[in-house]
Amino acid sequence: MPTTTGRVSARERLLAAADELFYNEGVHTVGIDRIIEHAGVAKASLYNTFGSKDELIHAYLKGRQHQVAERIQVAVDAADTPREKVLAVFEGQIAVYAESGYQGCAFHRASAESRPGDRIDLTTREYRAWVRSLFTELAEQAGAPDPVMLATQLHMVFDGNGMATRNDRGPDSMPIARAAATILLDAALN
Amino acid sequence: MPTTTGRVSARERLLAAADELFYNEGVHTVGIDRIIEHAGVAKASLYNTFGSKDELIHAYLKGRQHQVAERIQVAVDAADTPREKVLAVFEGQIAVYAESGYQGCAFHRASAESRPGDRIDLTTREYRAWVRSLFTELAEQAGAPDPVMLATQLHMVFDGNGMATRNDRGPDSMPIARAAATILLDAALN
DNA sequence: CTGAGACTAGACAGACCTGTTCACTCGGTC
DNA sequence: GACCGAGTGAACAGGTCTGTCTAGTCTCAG
């Protein structure tokens, strides 16, 4: 929502600052003051626009979900066969995982700081449910006899890959994850 | 370290309280006051014993690592063949994952609240390195031609299983993870 | 020129946090 | 009976946090 003059609105600058700081340092660690300083915005603007820090965190996570969904959907659409569409879910994340500042899945990071049942926890569950249902749908279209089971296994590799990328192996992790996904997929279809 | 009278020392009560509260609610969320209240211990005792909250967190994580390592080692030792020893790493976690209050891997939770390079981050990396090297060693003994690759894949399933157990599927997750590990193991040994 | 809406700077309230300090108690040992 | 180490309870310092509020600025449409 840029203003008519072309300048960037307070809302947009707040979201950009939240996206950067919350993701890199954690939603709990980063205080309101750092957000507004980084955004170059007055504190009152934050509270006029979002109402609370919780609401800003929620908007940040929803933005992340939107971005991930879009990236993966593009990769899936670009794949030709049902089998390749399953593997494309991993493909869609390659570019992001390869970034030097990749800190792991934003939802897992935020969720680790949340209490069960709170706003963050619910948003994380929504995101995970979306990934799960995507894998299930694609597994079904690929002809897997037990699509839920295959989807759960691929989801595990997907999550584990994010962790390994952040903590251990960096971008080298992705081809290993892809190989694992291929093995599991082929074993399910055999 | 119980005292000679059989009463439980302040140190031990603090560690027990930290283990429960830090794990369930997060190392950042839980303040010193809640710890000492839950432990039934004076604040000065905490600072005499551990020196700082950071040091208490570190002791808490080290305790967790010790517990996990012990559980898994017992399961591995109980397995007969090299192949079964690989799968036993999952076995060792079954009882814990089945607990109703399971909140996911303590290290991932703490790590999500940490800054790169700090004490928590280093301890988490240590833990992950231990898991990785254990999988690598067992994969080698099982005769995998590329033990590092297989170990990385199994580690992904291991981590993804923890996440799925906490967030989606509960204890149902474990047999699915075990099935995935079996497929990956057999494919590597072919 | 005027008025409306978005935005700003900064002080402030009230809660909560870590860490320090001090005077004290209690159980066991020499 | 004197001593000593471990632990206690409470007050306190100094900082940070979210959220509120006020008074004022800037821009643009009519």
Image: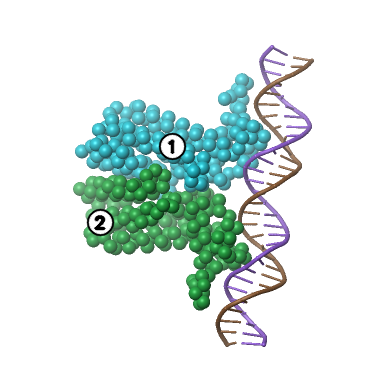
Chain colours: A cyan, B green, C brown, D purple
Q: Residues within 10 Å of mark 1 (few under 14, many from 20)?
A: some
Q: What is the quadrant of the C terminus of chain A in the image?
A: top left
Q: Reply above or below: B148 against B40.
A: above
Question: What kind of residue is marked 2?
Answer: Glu
Residue A168 horizontal/vertical position (percent):
41, 49
Left or right: residue C29 compared with residue A139: right
Q: Residue at x 29, y 52 (%)?
A: B147
Q: Reply above or below: B55 against A132.
A: below
Tag nearer the camera, 1 or 2: 1
Residue B155 horizontal/vertical position (percent):
35, 50
Q: Using the rendered image of the protein, determine whether residue A28 is visible from the camera's viewpoint.
A: yes
Q: Residue at x 36, y 56 (%)?
A: B95
In front of the other: A174 or A62: A62
Q: Residue at x 37, y 37 (%)?
A: A132
Label 1 with label 2: CB-CB less than 8 Å:
no
| Numbered mark located on residue A63 in the image | none
Question: What kind of residue is marked 1?
Answer: Tyr
Does dot 1 land on a helix, a strand or a loop? helix
Q: Which residue is mark 1?
A: A127
Does dot 2 land on a helix, a strand or a loop? helix
Residue B88 horizontal/vertical position (percent):
29, 56
In the rendered structure, the residue with mark 2 lies on which chain?
B
Left or right: residue A48 compared with residue B61: right
In front of the other: A39 or C27: C27
Q: Reply above or below: D26 against A55.
A: above
For the residues marked 1 and 2, what is the alpha-carbon distance in whole angstroms? 35 Å
